[in-house]
Amino acid sequence: MRAKLRRIVPLLAFILFPVFTECFSTEDGDRLEEAKAAFDSGEMGRAFRLFFPLAENGNIDAQFTVAWLYQHGRGVEQNCVEALRWYKEIEPKGDKRFYYLFGTLHETDGCGKDVEEALRWYRIAASNGSAKAQHALAKHYENGIGVEKDLATAFHWEYKAARGGSKRAQDNLAWMYWDGIGVAENIDEAVKWFTLRAEAGSTDAQCALAYFYEYGVKVWKSEARADYWYKKATRDGASPHECASARG
């Protein structure tokens, strides 16, 4: 059931949207806003054309975006050499976002994967408080990617990332508490994190809670609570099939 209820947040939004929301420059405001609007609407070719001259003029948000677009071949042909060049342009500026995003470059298909190097940059980013890097470390330790599998260490990093605001980490932390992965099973803590995500609009968490309460899975059976979360999930965009699949 776990696999059915947990959807992967699109990589595009996970990596790039925080760049805008955390540190979107007011320089060249109109052009930046136009570029961002193109990006948000999925017009990646237009977004690249708008961001590129801003990046050449030294705007760090545009440079991050151009690097990422080259890295993933969105709106432009994938070119890892160009992505690396733009990241190196950013590095001396000391922006903390660099460490995590540069780490992702070393795990991108087509860019000569080097997991050890990616982990090195994730650790630097994590030590600087990057919740995304902390979550990345957690998943590597949970799955034994580039490191020896260590569920306790995975939980350590996931907890930090969840506390730091990573939605992906919060989703996974709820399941770690629920299933006792890397930590003793703690249903109260699991329900707390599921509820946090459910109240924030996660239909996965809403459907999960509804299922648990409907069938009394590790919690007191409550038709009222199950009905509440099923209805909220539907209102928040879950399809009837999607939430019904949680019922088994």
Image (cartoon, rainbow, N blue to C red):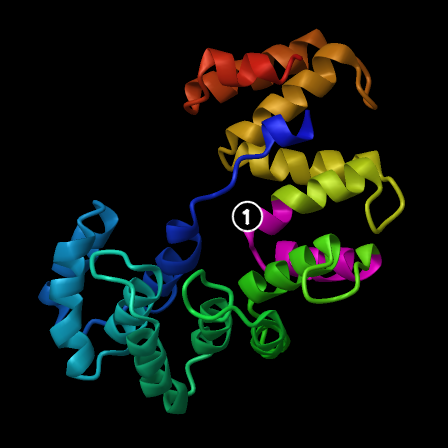
Is residue 239 within the magenta segment? no
Task: Say left or right for 35 vs 64.
Answer: left
* Snapshot quadrant of residue 135: bottom right
Can residue 41 be seen in this snapshot?
yes
Task: Say left or right for 224 vs 23.
Answer: right
- Image: 200 above or below 111: above
- How many numbered callouts? 1
Q: What is the three-letter code of the residue carrying label 1? A: Lys
Question: Which one is nearer the viewer's eye here, 125 or 120?
Answer: 120
Which residue was labeled with disc 1? 167
Magenta range is 152-170
Farthest residue toward the bottom? Answer: 92
* Snapshot quadrant of residue 6: top right
Task: Say left or right for 1 vs 112.
Answer: right
Question: Which one is nearer the viewer's eye here, 111 or 168?
Answer: 111
- Image: 123 above or below 71: below
- Image: 196 above or below 77: above
Question: Which one is nearer the viewer's eye here, 1 or 191?
Answer: 1
On the image, the x and y values in percent for residue 103 come to 51, 72
- Image: 113 above or below 179: below
On the image, the x and y values in percent for residue 205 come to 60, 31
